[in-house]
Amino acid sequence: MMSDFDEYIRQGEPDKKEKSQIWQTAIGLQQVDGLKPSAYLIETAKLNIEGDITFEEVKNRIDVYYKIQVKRDDDDRTEEADKVSARIAEILSEKTFSFSPVFYLNIHRRLFIGIYKYAGKIRDYNITKAEWVLDGNTVYYSSAPLIKETLEYDFREEKNFTYKGLTKQEQIEHISKFISGVWQIHAFGEGNTRTTAVFAIKYLRTFGFKVENEPFTQHSWYFRNALVRANYNNHTKNIYATTKYLNCFFENLLFDGNNILKNRELHIHYVAPENSVVNEPEIVIVNTQNVGVKKSNVSVNVSVNVSVKEKIIDLISQMPSVTVKEMSKILSVTERTIYRQIVILKAESIITRVGSDKTGYWEIVKIRGEED
């Protein structure tokens, strides 16, 4: 789906390139909730990139499109994905910003008005959320009565902070701390990650950062899981809140870093394979039926079968709504091979399918090799 806009980026026309990158980011951010926009949204976005219609016209067309559609299944949230993608693209295209909690709340209102009845409103109830990356546990979010006060405090502290004289690493660490702190408040019942991401992009642009679209386009679910790990502690199990994953994400986002972002590495029970190499594009597993591979001057043994499985797991972790056909194209293997490996992964209770084949998504149940 993201490749639909690559032609405009390659053409190099500044206006079309910028719009296509904005659309890639807007659509990529839907992955944080396992959502996938429709083909109609993609075609409408292309008209906007070409300059044939405005963002306002995009939104109007999407509204009309869904008014005449046959009612979908209750679990089909394509309409939400389409509408929120269009709204994110519009907000990111605007050269306006105000550093305040009011602006933050307004982003949520603009993104979700007509979708959530509480759009732009601070939640008045406490929440918990079972997280795959935490083995079903939850981050402790801000208590409802304290949200407004806590949000204002975080913004006030950030406004008084100066980035002058900081090294690149110090800037990254502070940005991670601020953004993860705002997210941990979880001011809204739903839509917190997408709202925080849009706010972060617009805020970081005010510092002159050229915010790369690729991290949010391809790794928005990693971004959410990194926010979770930055706010979770379980001292009885020697698990401590860490921004190291978020730091990797922001280094890629702001400084063209080349950190490898793999969701499974964020899981609290993840154990790196003994033969893995830091920042190598593949995690290697030693197993039977091995073939020798030499990479970056390091000789390792990689199991062909396990390699395909690991790639499928990585792909699902980054794109929960990915189809078998898309997996086949991305991994350059036959659909039959994908089906066969999925059957094995499901039998091993490593992955499961949530919802229907048409509108559902994949979920990773446990890390490969994890004890039952």
Image: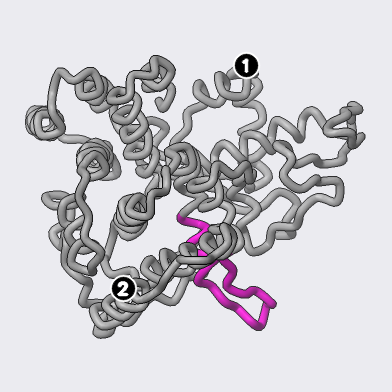
- The image quadrant of residue 308 is top right
Callout 2: 10 Å neighbours few (<14), some, many (20+)?
some
Is residue 240 inside the magenta stretch?
yes
Q: Give the residue type that dot 2 points to.
A: Phe
Q: Secondary structure at mark 1?
A: loop
x, y percentage for residue 48?
20, 24
Q: Indicate which disc residue 334 carries.
A: 1
Q: Is residue 324 left or right of residue 25?
A: right
Residue plotted at (36% across, 32% down): 21
Residue plotted at (35% across, 25% down): 17
Q: Nearer the viewer, residue 369 or 115?
A: 115
Q: Is residue 14 left or right of residue 31?
A: left
For marks 2 and 1, give the CA distance. Answer: 51 Å
x, y percentage for residue 268?
64, 64
Magenta stretch in the rendered image: 224-243
Residue 82 appearing in the image? yes
Mark 1 and mark 2 in contact (Cβ < 8 Å)? no
- The image quadrant of residue 146 is bottom left
